[in-house]
Amino acid sequence: MSVENKKVSEVMNRTLFTVAEEATIGEIIDTMLKNRISAVIVVAGNGEFLGIVSKTDIIDALKKYGAEIFNKKAEDLLCPKPYTIEGEATIKEAAKRMLAHGVHRLLVINPTGLGKYVPVGIITATDILKALAF
């Protein structure tokens, strides 16, 4: 099997860093810095997936709100419908999707069949580059 035909599930990062919907911007930034990541998953109190907050979302909010950003919560900044891909897709498909949407990461999902999905990982452009290099 050629490298670009590897499955997303073989390359993705299965560790998802989550924050509560009421997490402050400071808590989100702290989580990102401590874990050397560029996005967090936002979940409700019952564990339900609500969206994603990336460092780009924070930068955009800083431009929009200025110092008022520190009064915002995760629920105020999250992207409720991030770009996604299923684990059975190839990394070539993931790369095409990232390029088409101008993003650096895709949330890897497992559909529940009930019109909802469960996040199971994240694949980034860096993950794809690593797979191609090794």
Image (spheres, rainbow, N blue to C red):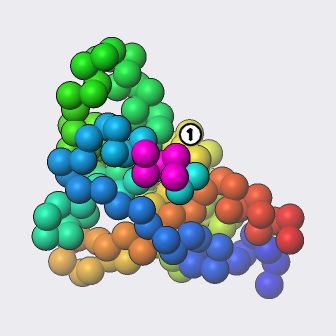
Outermost residue on the bottom side: it is 1
Q: Position of residue 131 (x, y in %)?
A: 76, 68
Describe the element under mark 1 as helix, strand or loop.
Answer: loop
Quadrant including the N terminus: bottom right
Q: At 76% from the left edge and 58% from the top edge, which residue is drawn?
A: 129
**Picture layout, residue 83 above or below residue 66:** below
Is 72 in the magenta? no
Q: Position of residue 90 (x, y in %)?
A: 63, 72
Q: At 33% from the left edge and 15% from the top edge, which residue is drawn?
A: 66
**Picture layout, residue 15 above or below residue 96:** below
**Residue type at numbered disc 1:** Gly
Main SS of the magenta segment?
helix
Q: Position of residue 40 (x, y in %)?
A: 40, 53
The local crowd at label 1, few if under 14, some if 14 to 19, many if 20 or more residues have their Cα within 10 Å, is few
Q: At 40% from the left edge and 25% from the top edge, which residue is drawn?
A: 60
Report which residue position mark 1 lands on: 102
Tell me where the magenta segment starts and ends, as one range: 30-34
The picture quadrant where one finds residue 59 is: top left
Number of disc labels:
1
